[in-house]
Amino acid sequence: MAKITYIEHSGAQHVVDVETGLTVMEGAIRNLVPGIDADCGGACACATCHVYVDPDWMARTGERESMEESMLDFAGDVRDNSRLSCQIKVSEALDGLIVRLPEQQG
Amino acid sequence: MTVGTVIIGAGQAGLSAAEALRKRGYAGPVTLLGDEAAPPYQRPPLSKGYLSGELPAERLWLKPEAYFDAASITLRTGVRASALDRAGRRVLTHEGEAIAYEHLILATGGAARRLSLPGADLPGVHVLRSLAEADALSDALSGARRLAIIGAGYIGLEVAASARKRGLEVSVLEAADRPMARTASPLLGGWFGALHRGYGVDLRVSTGVAAITGADRADGVRLADGERVEADLVLIAAGLVPGTQLAEAAGLDCADGILVDTHARTSDPDIFAIGDVARFDSDLYGRSIRLESVQNAIEQGRAAAAAICGAPADYDPVPWFWSDQYDRKLQIAGLIEGADAMVRRGDPELGAFALFHFQDGVLIACEAVNSAPEFMTAQRLIAARARPDPDRLRDTTVAMRAFLS
């Protein structure tokens, strides 16, 4: 389990426990965190699960892979700490992770 | 008290409509009826990660159980609608129940097509559309050595890739002269054919099937030319038959799908149809289309919800699709039918390339293999009915972003 904090664009916070092995996207869906659409269900095909990783956590969430990088290129309001949450695998090392959600997906 | 909206079909489209009704503040009851035992789940992985064993069933669920209570959506699984009583505005079920509606949404999807081949009813012959069918196929793969797949469309090829990952010998038999003949360009279909052969799949095109052989269970396939392909099990992957039975019996207009307008409304103003089963007029393509895709399920579900909530908006999507085979990701934007010119960008030999398809100089489709920027850019260009310069598109030193400014 890892405790993950999802912060909506409005500022609303959701602190939830996410099973390791799932993705940060799945953690949001399973815990009814609004703001992550994930139309393609995690296949890295749609760019509707965009999140901003808290700068303190960027090293631990790892690098974007090239497909993710390319998809993100075309999401809205992309920043240095943008990730597709379906591509971040939850492990014990991410216990305490904080991600923020963009104003809208797509 | 209002009787609210009843949705028949608890797949991606039905769920999307239910969710969108609530997001729009719809106040009436929302009832989601599914004829399968499982709660709403993702179908795409059934032929990919779920079948290859990388994704467990619990990761297929589109929503956790708690969602339905939280959103006041009554999910009823294992309920099969048997008829629509349009005059009485009721759905009748196999169990004899009558469920009243103010608005009805048909999200009935369809069933895998079964062929009328000799032997097609033998044990050991599978189709793949539902989770139960995926489980049956997966169990059968566990004890098998050789799989024969009839049909080289997306499902056939994705299952071939998944079965190769599980170590089976795989034959794919396709009547057309190339894989994915119905939806993909010849170049792309040929490229995927070569990819599969490279992974050891015995792919045969222009190959008719005469019969599935076997006395009390399938043991192979007899080809039209008499040759026999041995197999421990057979998958028929011959496309989808849209689930129009309820609509047709109720007298709604149907023609290879339930006919709907751009607000997803059928010929009965109180009844909507969405997702794989719905056929609608595409302004973008100037013809009626029926899309079998996650995107269409989600977005047309939202369109029906918008109309029910009194905020109709014309639904005219740029269709998009994806497929994962081995380590290649295919993403398609638009529909290639009617294309009269093609531009290639990138080198198919290197495994990443995109094919842009034009009609009268207007970009109408893009097939992208491991080429997300091309795919994402094409979606926008197609929506804008743009005429990108073919020479610049061909030139990989011109970044895709440049076409959006």
Image (tube, coloured by chain):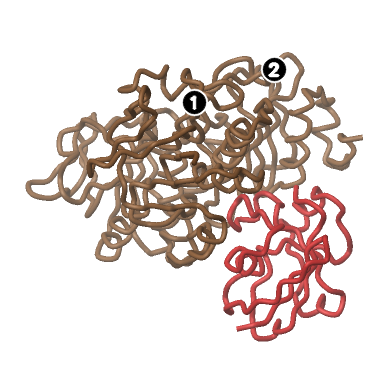
**Is residue A7 shown above or below B310?**
below
* Residue drawn where x is 81% and y is 57% of the image: A102
Chain A hue?
Answer: red
* x then y, percent, for residue B17: 55, 42
Answer left or right for B335 relative to B239.
Answer: right
Q: Is residue B160 above or below residue A66?
A: above
Whether B116 is drawn above or below A78: the answer is above
Q: Residues within 10 Å of mark 1 (few under 14, many from 20)?
A: some
In front here: B268 or B238? B268
| Residue B119 location, quadrant | top left
Q: Please state which amino acid type lies under the numbered disc 1.
A: Asp
Give the Cα distance between marks 2 and 1.
Answer: 37 Å
Residue B49 or residue A81, whichever sits in front: A81
Amino acid of disc 2? Gln
Rendered-image quadrant of the C terminus of chain B: top right
* Location of residue A28 (image quadrant): bottom right
What residue did someone put label 2 on?
B359
Task: Give the chain letter at badge 2.
Answer: B
On the image, numbered disc 1 is attached to which residue?
A: B270
Q: Quick one: SS at disc 2?
A: strand
Q: Residue at x 84, y 36 (%)?
A: B395
Which type of secondary structure does the marked residue at label 1 adopt? loop
Choose the circle earlier in sequence order: 2 or 1: 1
Q: Residue B371: where, in percent of width, then height?
A: 71, 46
Q: Nearer the viewer, residue B383 or B23?
A: B23
Residue B155 in the figure: left or right of residue B274: left
User: Which tag is nearer the camera, tag 2 or tag 1?
Assistant: 1
Q: Which chain comes out brown in the rendered image?
A: B
